[in-house]
Amino acid sequence: MPDPNSSGAATPRVRFAPSPTGFLHVGSARTFIFNWLYARHNHGTMVLRLDDTDIERNTETSVQSIFEGLRWLGLDWDEEVKQSERLDLHRQAAAAIFAKGLAYRDFTPAHASDDEHSSSQGAWLFNPGMRELSREESGRRADAGEPFALRYRVPRGGGRILRFVDGVYGEQQKLADEVEDFALLRSDGMPTYHLASCVDDADLRISHIIRGQDHLTNTFKHLLIFEGLGAPTPQFAHLPLLMAPDGAKLSKRKHGPVVSVTTYRDAGFLPQAFINFLCLLGWSPKNDREFLSLDEIRDLFTLDGVNRANAVVNFTNDDPFDAKAVWLNAEHIRALPVDELSDNLRPFFEQAGFHPSPEKVLAVAPLIRERIKLLRDAVSAADFFFLDQLAPYDAAELIPQKGDAALARRVLETAQQVLAVTPFDHDSLDKALREAAASLGLKAGPMFQPIRVAVCGRKNAPPLFETMVVLGRDVCLDRIRQAEEGLRSLG
RNA sequence: GGCGCUAUCGUCUAGGGGUUAGGACGUGAGAUUCUCAAUCUUAAAACCCGGGUUCGAUUCCCGGUAGCGCUACCA
């Protein structure tokens, strides 16, 4: 146990304590990010604690997927502990609290107590019979092997007020009489969340507990546990919750994969964009800036900037991603150096069955960077760069707005002649093709569209000259020839 | 039911006793352009309701309402 007198820590110690009951939830990810920001902004220490005491629900695959999510975010931590390995510590702490008379054994069968709770009108606070059981009888029944839960003996009748100053919500207070005698140990001897969490926070000398607002009222219980432990009380800061558009708290069960960070990753969010988006949910730098790098956020981050109202993640059935998250991602994509963008793009191409060389990706990336919002969009935006044979398209698309098949054919014939002899660089192509247009008495639009469709297989594509340079002369000429044939078949 | 927290455009938010209530996303219109995108300009869009306090409240206080959270031998 830490020395209660040595609490005046210089640098903060924070922790992120996920319980491995599934994938990494966006709400958990945000809590992690805020803790990280607080730690790094204040040159403190970040502890990752796996709250894996719920053996019923915890799985190894869940542990893996949480680490996977955290690794993707790219934020580091300094220490790592597993709660399940500290069982002895938790039980000793429970014994110590019991020894001080601050807890009592409750022999009420678990189900029976449930019934009593639900039948009561107000909040269930305590069971007088058990709370007042004599030391002797309690000991006798325990020795006889009768199972019991250990409950905190919350101070009653003294008008005691529990208080703390929350880093986000300010002064908080509650009458101890309104706090129920919560369990410390279950009847199977396992510690409850409240006990394990506080014991570990105390033992790990956590100075700032930054967590979801769903724990705001639990904090009064935690105050009591720290007191029972004789440990210094950490600072608390609660974060507003993330809500779904339907008004409910974002949950795996109700809202499905949209609450998993892997969904964002797989769709092609950049981690820094995802972090940027999550930070803006409940926090503001208060300077009208929204597109921020991780370094900027870290430098700007303070608890003062955290607001108190829950935030809605605005997804729909049609679109699982908040429009602002998508926009931010597009911004971050554009801000990325080409080589980094290429590195991020390659896995998406690979997964789509394309295996372009790194050089090719590097050449393509600048042409599509302003045309994609998610990395996965790159596949459909750039497929024609990688295909040996263009997918079939409607030859009618080759015909410009005000024109006919004959015109389109003339354009493509001329283009072939020009491209056969023009150096394949942007400026030469630009000059030669514009001159060709003039010679045909055409404006740029009607001239370029047939070529673009011929070369890309669609009307909307990156700028024509850059595209042709990447594709190369042979491919361009070949595709234009094929387009001409298609046009002929059209009649 | 009890206790707690919260309330500014559709969404994320800034602001704060006197403001044309600011920004962003999204949406509409226009400009630019070889298409698309990007970019630029522009428009529509908000202080939950009722009482106080005050010369003046969206802002402070109280009440209501609504939403959320906690009220487990879940975390």
Image (spheres, coloured by chain):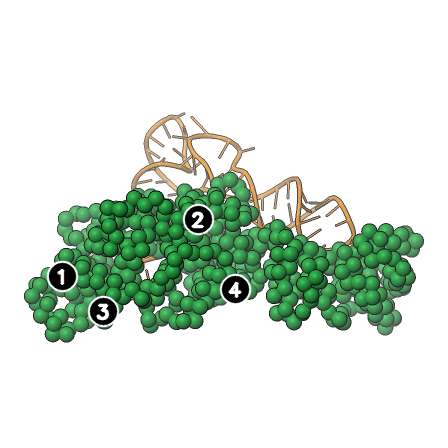
Chain colours: A green, B orange
Same subunit: marks 3 and 2: yes
Q: Indicate the chain on which mark 1 is placed.
A: A
Circle 1 residues within 10 Å: few <14, some 14–19, many ≥20: some
Q: Is residue A124 left or right of residue B15?
A: left
Q: Considering only order in the chain, which callout, 2 or 3, is on the residue closer to the N terminus?
A: 2
Image quadrant assignment for residue A145:
bottom left
Residue A154, compared with residue A68, is above or below; it is: above
Please state which amino acid type lies under the numbered disc 2.
Arg
Residue A232, compared with residue A268, is above or below; it is: above
Which residue appears farthest toward the bottom when viewing the image? A145
- Mark 2 highlights which residue? A40
| Dot in front, 3 or 2 | 2
| Dot in front, 4 or 2 | 2
Q: Are the residues at dot 1 and dot 4 in contact (C-beta closer than 8 Å)? A: no
| Dot in front, 1 or 2 | 2
Say which element carries label 1.
Answer: helix
Mark 4–mark 2 distance (CA, rounded to whole Å):
27 Å
Q: Considering only order in the chain, which callout, 2 or 1, is on the residue closer to the N terminus?
A: 2
Circle 2 residues within 10 Å: few <14, some 14–19, many ≥20: some
**How far across and how far down the image is residue A148, in percent?**
18, 69
- Mark 4 highlights which residue? A263
The residue under the point 54% across, 43% down is A289
Q: Considering only order in the chain, which callout, 2 or 4, is on the residue closer to the N terminus?
A: 2
Disc number for residue A131: 1
- Mark 3 highlights which residue? A189
Please state which amino acid type lies under the numbered disc 3.
Gly
